[in-house]
Image (cartoon, rainbow, N blue to C red):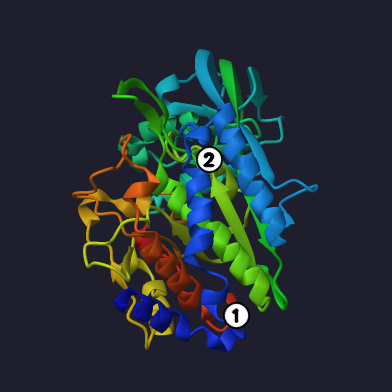
Amino acid sequence: MKKLLVLYLVTASVHGFGQKAEDIINVKEVTRLETTLASDDMRGRKAGTADACKAAAFIAEEFKKAGLQPVSNGNYLQQFSMLRSKMKELKAKFEGADVDTKNIVVLTAKVNLEADEKSGFAVEYIKAGDNFQRKALELAYSNKNSLVVVDTSFQKNFSRLAGLKRQLFSSQKDVVFILANMAPKEFQIKAEHEFSETKFANVVGILPGKSRKNELVIFSGHYDHLGIAKTPVGTDSIYNGANDDAAGVTAVITLANYYKKINNNERTLVFAAFTAEEIGGFGSQYFSRQFNPADVVAMFNIEMIGTEAKWGKNSAYITGYEKTDMGKMLQQNLKGSDFTFYPDPYTDQDLFYRSDNATLARLGVPAHTISTAKMDSEPNYHKLSDEVSTLDLDNMAAIITAIAVSSKTIVSGKEAPSRVKPENLR
């Protein structure tokens, strides 16, 4: 009885939308979606497999039934390819003199890249005092071929740029980072790579805004999980990933239905189910680079909300709570209910930068993850036992309802959270 009362209190404040949240967000529908996504038929939804494609097709059909617009050309699948590169040769000359290749990092999707000062490369700089990681990410995945001069004050950090080569997309522009204090007037760079390619797809649906179409609010979760275990436990070999993160995707689909039905979003809403979170966050990285960060007002990334938080029912936490005022804004919209959004209690685990919100957060977007996972004691995390039977689906429905209610002023255009400040980025 208490559970039903709390759910009523959470949903009561949604009356202003013209239709009660509980009429749309209900346990029956949450159970249907969760049970399908985490079923044995999905075989663990490992990214880059036919099983992930099956899950993506199901999500796309749900977005279509909800009445969302496809992301492009009638297709809800945002398809992309990842490249794994192996350097075969790298040579460089500046002003006719050979350059130590340890002071050069080349990002390219070309097997053979030859570039010089006549190749039309834009010259960019990471200057002393700049936010190194933020600036490097912006330039690495810009839509232009660039020669990036990195100030020698970043010599100790320069080698970290090689990590960007693990995040190459087939659409990657040619970007050459050099460690120097000024751009060479003449340069010749020759790089030869071998590539292996893997195809992936996010699932994305859009609900256009009424008066602020260019202002975006994103609701997201990742649909991939770990696939099939090499060593079964008894008769079980499928990582069902019910909480991680079929729960988040269930929330995204449910919220898509909710907002389409109440039909009063002034800002454009983007609903995204990401792939490849478990193997590097590649899906959200690709997705995030399709947007101008300045256009994204807020991002609600939802991950592992199927179990009770450490405070019990009707509660969840927000990663990076202190970095913007978004958490306080959401809680204010829940005034009069029994639901509470808490700051992340597991700050030692760096969760703010470990989930699919991270790419946009690093670019200043108030992009946060909402979760209930007890990261110090979650018994089924990344285990074969992460199944639907371990979830509290009533509480999960209440959490999704709370997200719907708490986001109302952001969706309506009445409020916008503060941005993540550069000094908070890393």
The numbered dot on residue 275 is: 2
Residue position marked by numbered label 1 in the rendering: 412
The residue that appears at 53% across and 15% down in the rendered structure is 91
Eyeballing the image, is 2 above or below 84? below
Q: Quadrant of residue 169?
A: top right
Q: x%, y% of residue 36? A: 53, 45
Under circle 2, the secondary element is loop
Task: Please state, as top left, top right, bottom left or bottom right, where the N terminus lies in the image.
Answer: bottom left
Q: Looking at the image, which residue sits at the far right? A: 73
Eyeballing the image, is 91 above or below 360? above
Which residue type carries mark 2? Thr
**How many marks do you count on the picture?**
2
Judge from the rendering whether residue 213 lies leftward or rightward of residue 336; answer left or right: right
Which residue type carries mark 1? Ser
Which label's residue is closer to the chain start, 1 or 2? 2
Q: Quadrant of residue 324?
A: bottom left
Q: Tell me if mark 2 has few (under 14), some (14-19) or many (20+) residues whose alpha carbon lies within 10 angstroms of its own.
A: many
Eyeballing the image, is 188 above or below 53? above
Q: Is residue 303 visible?
A: yes
